[in-house]
Image (tube, helix red, strand yellow):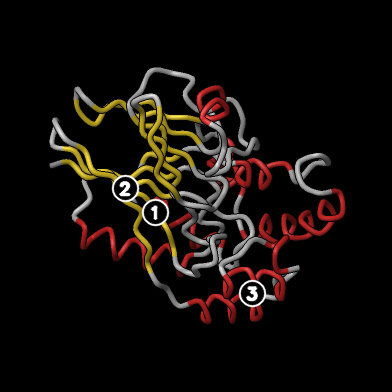
């Protein structure tokens, strides 16, 4: 049996990532894939990046990794949030080194690999062609096929929307990992996807891992994080910033 874990959207929440790493040890994982958004919007961007680099994982780029390299641009978020999120960008950027930013800039945008002869995987952050486009859990089969099932594979895995799900269509498995650091489904627990295969059968599940949410809230405060009160609500309620504003 081969076990592979897919993590995404850590967003500088090293406390949540540490809890997930402890869970990974208990699951005896063979391989780890991280689908981007490593540092931005959390109180410990440097620590989160260091933990990812310790994982011996395959890592790809997310839109928030691109933001850390060059800032948030108009049209990528609602107009009234561009200036505010760039305040967060300036704070997070100061926590990282030039080498850290170069690492984020150099990450690939997709991965293609096989777990065995029967399970080919295509992994990306948002869609195969974009770091920003959104495919929701209830998207139509046509939209899913046109935006996600772009290449030949049996499993398609992505992050970005912070809403975990597993869905089957056209004989394929579509998996969203949810978010390690900023879940948006109302459950304030880290989320990741676990895929197990023995070469003939395959099992997919979403694992939820409790972590010390209040410790993260205190870190936002003690580090004078921009928009600290907003982000504290996000981690405490497990909802998106737009829902708690």
Q: Secondary structure at mark 3?
A: helix
Name the residue rendered at 19%, 38% in the picture.
197
Vertically, is 79 above or below 156? below
Q: Residue 62's spot in the image, x, y percent?
A: 57, 41
| Position in image of residue 50 (x %, y %) | 45, 56
**Residue nearer the viewer, 100 or 166:** 166
Residue designated by label 1: 192
Q: Quadrant of the C terminus?
A: bottom right
- The residue at the point 61 percent across, 35 percent down is 131
Q: Is 38 on the left-hand or right-hand side of 119?
A: right
- Tell me the residue at 41%/32% (across/down): 156
Q: Are marks 3 and 2 in contact (CB under 8 Å)?
A: no
With respect to residue 75, does 239 lie above or below?
Answer: below
Q: CA distance from mark 3 to mark 2?
A: 27 Å
Q: Residues within 10 Å of mark 3 (few under 14, many from 20)?
A: many
User: Quick one: label 3 or label 2, which is nearer the N terminus?
Assistant: 2
Residue density around tag 2, few if under 14, some if 14–19, many if 20 or more, within 10 Å = many
Query: Viewer-proximal residue, 163 or 90?
Result: 163
Tell me the element at label 2: strand
Q: Residues within 10 Å of mark 1 (few under 14, many from 20)?
A: many
Q: Left or right of 81: which side holds 106?
A: left
- Left or right: 175, with 214 as reference point: left
Give me the C-alpha separation between circle 1 and circle 3: 21 Å
Disc 3 target residue: 232
Q: Please name the residue shown 66% across and 80% down the image.
A: 221
Nearer to me, 114 or 201:
201
Tell me, yes or no, whether the two marked residues, 1 and 2, touch with CB atoms within 8 Å. yes
Q: Earlier in the sequence, mark 1 or mark 2?
A: 2
Query: If you read the primary sequence from the N terminus, does the residue marked by circle 1 or circle 3 appear first?
Result: 1
Residue at label 2? 5
């Amino acid at each position: 049996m081969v076990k592979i874990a897919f993590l995404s959207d850590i967003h500088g929440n090293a406390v949540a990532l540490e809890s997930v790493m402890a869970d990974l040890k208990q699951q005896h994982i063979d391989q780890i894939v991280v689908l981007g958004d490593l540092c931005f919007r959390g109180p410990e961007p440097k620590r989160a990046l260091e933990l990812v680099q310790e994982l011996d994982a395959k890592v790809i780029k997310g839109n928030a990794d691109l933001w850390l390299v060059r800032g948030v641009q108009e049209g990528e978020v609602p107009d009234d949030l561009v200036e505010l999120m760039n305040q967060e960008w300036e704070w997070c950027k100061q926590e990282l080194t030039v080498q850290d930013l170069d690492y984020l800039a150099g990450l690939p945008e997709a991965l293609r690999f096989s777990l065995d002869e029967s399970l080919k995987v295509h992994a990306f952050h948002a869609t195969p062609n974009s770091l920003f486009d959104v495919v929701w859990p209830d998207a139509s089969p046509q939209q899913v096929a046109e935006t996600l099932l772009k290449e030949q594979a049996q499993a398609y895995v992505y992050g970005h929307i912070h809403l975990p799900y597993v869905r089957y269509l056209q004989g394929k498995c579509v998996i969203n990992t949810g978010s390690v650091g900023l879940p948006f489904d109302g459950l304030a627990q880290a989320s990741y996807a676990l895929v197990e295969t023995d070469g003939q059968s395959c099992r997919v599940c979403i694992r939820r891992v409790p972590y010390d949410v209040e410790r993260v809230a205190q870190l936002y405060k003690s580090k004078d994080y921009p928009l600290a009160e907003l982000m504290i609500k996000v981690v405490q309620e497990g909802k998106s910033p737009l829902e708690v504003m």
